[in-house]
Image: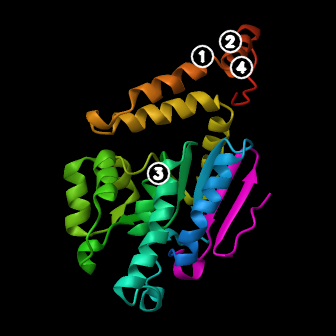
Amino acid sequence: MAIELETTKMIAEVEDGIGWMTFNNPDRRNAVSLEMWAAMPTILDAFEADDRVRVIVMKGAGDRAFVAGADISEFDKRRSSAAESDKYGDVAQGAHRALKALQKPMLAMVQGYCIGGGLAIALYADMRIVTEDSRFAIPAARLGLGYAFDGLRMLVDLVGPSYAREIMFTARQFSAEEALRIGLANRVVPRAALEATVRDYATTIAGNAPLTIRAAKAAIAEVLKDPEARDLEALEAITRACFDSADYAEGRLAFREKRSPNFTGK
């Protein structure tokens, strides 16, 4: 089932417990336009509220790119002044906030280019499964752009400070093999195997206990915060809810009966 949006450049579909969010601008290698940024919170909020959706997958349309950055062709119109740039930034930040706040697990299905803003989006995914010909870069140093703290913190948390410096200072493209080695990618697969691999991962996650996955995602997020910013009481409540859930009872019963559990997220 597809979710109706005000733009055709984003596609949102729900299938077998998976929410698919597709960047649909293949003529520009799925570069993100203002209308695409604006649609992302709508899609993610809908997936978050839909009990049928157990896991979310982000992907790019076509076979050339996941997302090759922001759509610079619209900057003369959309970012022609400081005021216009502020409006654009507010919309883009709304998308980033929605990505960051997501409680359900999310995978990035990457083939081809994952560049600049595209890599920034992919960093929000809990796992990145990529093709052998994928390419990764943040070309800010070639454009004179400054990168905000939150984006760089996610990069440092993922690959460490030394590789984050290399990515930012050189602005060069990293191969899929390099991305796997430094922790930017979780798995590298042949292009022909990408969708099947991602579906297998997503289906496996969708079949597991949603409350357990939510608690694990929340705990990992707290680990990555500064100690004084951690909300351990809230995390304790999320963890205790797992033990009080019907899913915990179902998991124990299924184990005793030697069958696959049927989790409901309650």
Nearest to the observer: residue 248 or residue 46: 46
- Amino acid beneath label 3: Lys
The residue range painted magenta reads 1-30
Of 264 and 208, nearer the camera is 264
> Would residue 17 be found to the left or right of residue 223 on screen?
right
Q: Is residue 219 left or right of residue 263?
A: left
Q: Image height check: is 51 above or below 68?
A: above
Location of residue 241 with respect to 196 vertically, above or below: above
Q: Which mark is residue 246?
A: 4
Residue underneath mark 3:
100
Gap in angstroms between the C-alphas marked 1 and 2 = 11 Å
Q: In this figure, which residue is indicated by the disc labeled 2?
A: 252
* Residue type beneath disc 4: Ala
Mark 2 → mark 3, Cα distance in angstroms: 33 Å
Q: Are marks 1 and 2 in contact (CB under 8 Å)?
A: no
Q: In the structure shown, which secondary structural element does the residue marked by tag 3 occupy? A: helix
Q: CA distance from mark 1 to mark 4?
A: 9 Å
Q: Earlier in the sequence, mark 4 or mark 2?
A: 4
Residue 41 percent across, percent down from the top left: 58, 61
Say left or right for 164 vs 223.
Answer: left
Residue found at x 37% / y 51%: 184
Q: Amino acid at mark 2?
A: Arg
